[in-house]
Image (cartoon, rainbow, N blue to C red):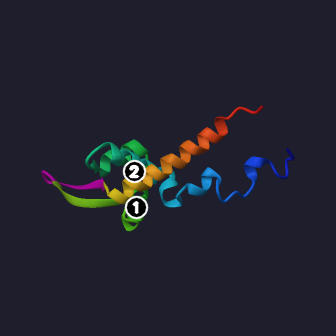
Amino acid sequence: MSVEDPPAARDDHENPHPTRALDDTVHQRVRLGVLAVAREVERVDFGFLKKQLAVTDGNLSRHLKVLEDSGLITLEKGYAGRRPRTWITLTRDGAQALDTELRALRALVDRLDVRPP
């Protein structure tokens, strides 16, 4: 095996590198966190996500907009008492996108966990 052309680095259309399956929309840290947290519950409150992901209101809002525009989440605005609230719900497409991302990440980890001969 040479450094220039290791078997794992070849452009193999039948067995592409796992990173090719990563979705840039989903893979970004905050957006992946939003999808992961939303997967665990029926719906999640904006404030809870903000604390869990350690982001600002503006930063989270921008990421939610990307996810909503992509059809991966829905946003519902309302009130809890007199306080305005925004709830985030994972869509079916969002769940599928998260599953695809997790499969790609597992494939990458599996590939890297193989011990050299």
Which secondary structure lies at badge 1? helix
- Residue indicated by mark 2: 34
* In the foreground, 103 or 88: 103
Where does the image place residue 50, in percent across and percent down from the top left?
A: 37, 48
Q: Please report the bounds of the magenta region as a residue range.
A: 80-89
> Which quadrant is home to the C terminus?
top right
- Residue indicated by mark 1: 67
Residue positioned most to the front: 14
User: What is the spatial separation of the Cα atoms under label 1 and label 2, in whole angstroms?
Assistant: 9 Å
Where does the image place residue 2, in percent across and percent down from the top left?
A: 87, 47
Residue occupying image coordinates x 33% and y 57%: 92
Q: Earlier in the sequence, mark 1 or mark 2?
A: 2
Circle 2: is it few (<14), some (14-19), or many (20+) Cα within 10 Å?
A: many
Main secondary structure found in the magenta portion: strand
Residue occupying image coordinates x 80% and y 48%: 6
In the figure, 84 relative to 112: above or below? below
Q: Are marks 1 and 2 in contact (CB under 8 Å)?
A: yes
Where does the image place residue 86, in percent across and percent down from the top left?
A: 26, 56
Q: Is residue 57 visible?
A: no
